[in-house]
Amino acid sequence: MIVAMLTAAWSRAAGWMAAVGAALVLLLGAYLGGRRDGRTAARTATQERAARAREIRNEVDRAVDRSGDPADELRRDWQRGL
């Protein structure tokens, strides 16, 4: 009699535990997927910022290269004060 009640209780509980386990697996999958997506988004944002910083650096380098040598300009434009 007690064995029959324990068996019946276990069969009902086993079904509920399987359902709870499946729900936990789904939640864990969603959590890990969100972490992966967040990591990917952060990496993409970092790469975009780095690319923009390289563009700005290259613009500055080109502007400096076009500006010429300040020492040459000073020697060329130098005149003895009268």
Image (cartoon, helix red, strand yellow):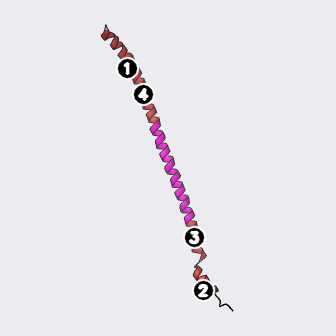
User: How far is mark 2 from mark 3, CA to CA?
Assistant: 23 Å
Q: Element under label 2?
A: helix
Q: Residue at x 57, y 63 (%)?
A: 56
Residue type at mark 1: give it.
Answer: Ala
Q: Position of residue 37 (x, y in %)?
A: 49, 43
Q: Position of residue 8 (x, y in %)?
A: 36, 13
Q: Element under label 3?
A: helix
Disc on res. 62? 3
Residue that badge 1 annotates: 14
Residue that badge 2 annotates: 75
Q: Position of residue 45 (x, y in %)?
A: 53, 51
Q: Earlier in the sequence, mark 4 or mark 3?
A: 4
Q: Quadrant of residue 74?
A: bottom right
Q: Position of residue 67 (x, y in %)?
A: 60, 75
Q: Earlier in the sequence, mark 2 or mark 1?
A: 1
Q: Quadrant of the C terminus?
A: bottom right
